Image (cartoon, rainbow, N blue to C red):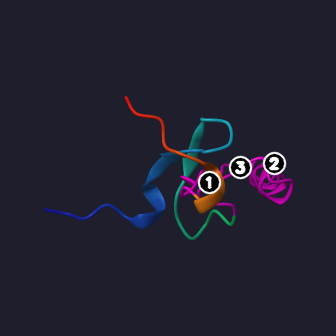
Amino acid sequence: MTTPSPTSRSVRCPGCGGPSPYGPDNPYRPFCSERCKSLDFGAWASEAYRVGVKREPQEDDGPVPSS
């Protein structure tokens, strides 16, 4: 059994959905290009991606409605 070379692996680009070589020869990995990497970075920088949090009830929120 032979192990595939890490340079031969292809993954889906998170930016455009196209194929992207995943290995040390791709400086933009897991993205396929500088453009896709920059667009993703810009979305993070402008806070387009957010992680939702469940807010804990506070004392001054009033009574909890019954079901």
* Residue span colored magenta: 28-57
| Secondary structure found at label 1 | loop
**Mark 2: amino acid:** Leu
Q: Where 13 falls versus 24 (above or below)?
A: above
52 left or right of 11 in image: right
Categorize mark 1 by other alpha carbons within 10 Å: few (<14), some (14-19), many (20+): few
Gap in Å between the C-alphas at discs 1 and 2? 19 Å
Residue 38 lies, in percent from the top left, at 82, 55
Q: Which residue is mark 1?
A: 51
Residue mark closest to the camera, 3 vs 1? 1
Q: Where 59 falls versus 12 (above or below)?
A: below
| Secondary structure found at label 3 | loop
**Mark 3: amino acid:** Tyr
Residue 49 lies, in percent from the top left, at 71, 49
Q: Which residue is mark 2?
A: 39
Sequence-first tag of 1 and 2:
2
CB-based contact (under 8 Å), mark 3 and mark 1: yes
Look at the magenta stretch and give its main secondary structure.
loop
Residue 28, labelled with which disc? none
| Secondary structure found at label 2 | helix
**Mark 1: amino acid:** Val
Residue 49, labelled with which disc? 3
Of all residues, the one furthest to the bottom in this rendering is 24
Q: What residue is rendered at 59% in x and 60% in y?
A: 58
Gap in Å between the C-alphas at discs 3 and 1? 7 Å
